[in-house]
Image (cartoon, coloured by chain):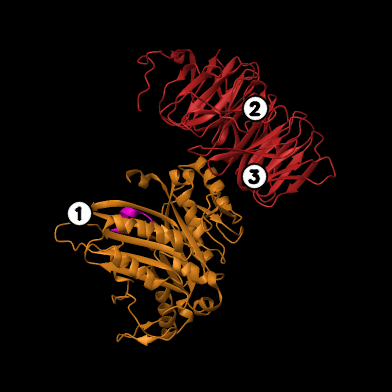
Amino acid sequence: MAEASQKIPVTVLTGYLGAGKTTLLNRILSENHGKKYAVIVNEFGEIGIDNDLIIGADEEVFEMNNGCICCTVRGDLVRIMDGLMKRKGKFDAIIVETTGLADPAPVAQTFFVDEDVQKNARLDAVVTVADAKWLSDRLKDAPEAKNQIAFADVIVLNKTDLVSKPELAEVEARIRGINPYAKLHRTERCQVGLTDVLERGAFDLDRILEIEPDFLEAGDDHDHDHDHHHNHDHDHNHDHGHGLKHYHDEDMQSLSLRSEKPLDPTKFMPWLQNLVATEGQKILRSKGILAFTGDDDRYVFQGVHMMLEGDHQRKWKDGEKRESRVVFIGRELPEQAIRDGFEQCITT
Amino acid sequence: MKEFDPGEAPSSIVSITDRVKQLPLGAAVGSVHFLGDRAFFVGAEESVAIATIDGEITRTETHFGAILCAASDGKRLVTGGDDGKLIAIDAKGEISTIATDAKRRWIDNVALHSDGTVAWSAGKTAFVRNPKGEEKTFEVPSTVGGLAFAPKGLRLAIAHYNGVTLWFPNMAANPEFLEWAGSHLAVTFSPDNKFLVTAMHEAAMHGWRLADNRHMRMSGYPGRVRSMSWSAGGKGLATSGADTVIVWPFTSKDGPMGKEPAMLAPMPARVAVVACHPKNDIMAVGYADGTVLMVRFEDGAEILVRRNAGAAVSALGWNAKGTLLAFGTEDGDAGILEM
């Protein structure tokens, strides 16, 4: 993992049409932060900054020839990364802007499956810019918008000046109904601290530790537990007693599993692998911190659709609660089957 | 794995490392080509370094940015860059601009025909320009992965996603399409014009027998094939991508179909570049650990040209007579060997 820091970090910038991606990009490129970014954009000319490291890309999504139907990659990215690596040392990080209608998965998967890309670069985070005024509508009529929220590590909820407080609470609740784990920032004209969107290390197994508070507490501005034990009807909202509306999205959910008893690795690993192999098309993101029976090390994993990576991370500390937590974000997740399967992996 | 010491091996590999003229270029090398007796080292970015066997180096600025592709016909060297320019350099080192992409798109691929025609690609568009300056373009369904002219006639192979398009720029006939699922990158014709082979995005190659478009699958590589080189007379196709050189036999009318490839020069590092000698049955092999070997096809006998050091070998080239071998590395080291 030591060499991970030498790999060039890549931030994927998504967001529905008009949400403010270009505004954020222009800010990143124009602000005086002493860093140089190579930017891969889908539409040339929108960026007002003169930079010889802005590369226009055609989003070419290719299926990998490995029999896995959801294993798609961005062929153009593979080629562009290859060319960019010839200019190593001329830039510090890469930003990939996707079109408003793009699914972030093929971009992310490119960094999991392509050997050459993986050698030189690492996925840093998926940042989704959302329009506070229109997101609620888009979540109803645009599956792409929902995908982008579900996939995000960081959500920049932009144009908050154009909505009332109740409207803002409503759209935030809708976002949290889909993805309670992303870092959420409310902004006007994308005025967010650049350190809040760049260099997040969201895909770095070693840093799953550092993002633990968000990971476990689900959100940065309130600490109520989003564990979905709710049994209320779909698509209504109810009050949790401190003014936060709670939505359950019809088709995109997150599912959180927890066990204070250790897991049996000989059961858990085959179960997880089988789960992503069979339900991987529905599972957009997965993450976990695991305590295995007879293992003094924490095990961490993360995944995108059918792709998983995991490793022993470090020893459990003295006095640290050896609790396993697993999170899935996906579409029409078979919740009960997943809960039952997980229960079976608990050492009794 | 770190130290490859030829002295310890019982059948002691012959070393000629002391006969190599060292050329500390100091900038990553992308490829090397001979124009006459001078080696033209194409940098990963910005410039071409021209070196003589005496070690004299002159550097010529050619692109404002990365140099993405290069091809040579022995008379000139043509390079394409991320500045959207296609540049020609002649044996004297004179530079001329062949084309500038109107949208400053990357020039991803270039190929040269023996009659002086040049082909290049930017995005999905392939261009050809004949010696009279007449230009034609052809668009394929996805980004061009590689270009190659057939050894006979004016026929251009354009590799892309899901296959290869064979385009005849001077004929009204529809282009031919050779289909195979997956992303096709580098493409090459066998010297006898009977076979077409692509290196794919996954760790495999694909081939077609052009008489009947019969498929040839060449797989089993641990890594992507980035370098392919035809042996003298086209008897075999030597390839990178494994920790030995994989040489596919092309002597029979069926090509490598149903045959095992030869596996030569095993090392504890991946083969990065291969370059077959233009006349004799030997090849130069560069590895990811910096080693350069000369290897005889017949029995796999090896001669050490450069010890492992630093970064991967990224360039190998012979002069037309086969009397000079040049190599370059990703960390800017290079050398010339007189045979």
Mark 3 lies on a secondary structure that is loop
Residue under numbered circle 3:
B84
Residue B54 showing in the rendered view: no
Question: Which quadrant, please, contains the C terminus of chain B?
Answer: top right
Percent of width and height locating residue A276: 42, 60
Mark on residue B250? 2
Spatial separation of the CA atoms under disc 1 and disc 3: 59 Å
Find out whether residue B289 is within the magenta segment. no
B313 or B87: nearer the viewer: B313
- Position of residue A62 in the picture relative to residue B267 (left or right): right
What's under tag 2, amino acid-wise? Answer: Phe
Residue A167 lies, in percent from the top left, at: 45, 84
User: Which chain is assigned red?
Assistant: B
The secondary element bearing badge 1 is classed as: loop
Q: From what the image shows, is residue A3 above or below residue B233?
A: below
> Which is more N-terminal, label 3 or label 2?
3
- The amino acid marked with disc number 3 is Gly
State if disc 3 and disc 1 touch (CB < 8 Å).
no
| Label 2: which secondary element | loop
Q: Residues within 10 Å of mark 1 (few under 14, many from 20)?
A: few
Q: Is residue A318 left or right of residue B83?
A: left
The residue labelled by disc 1 is: A294
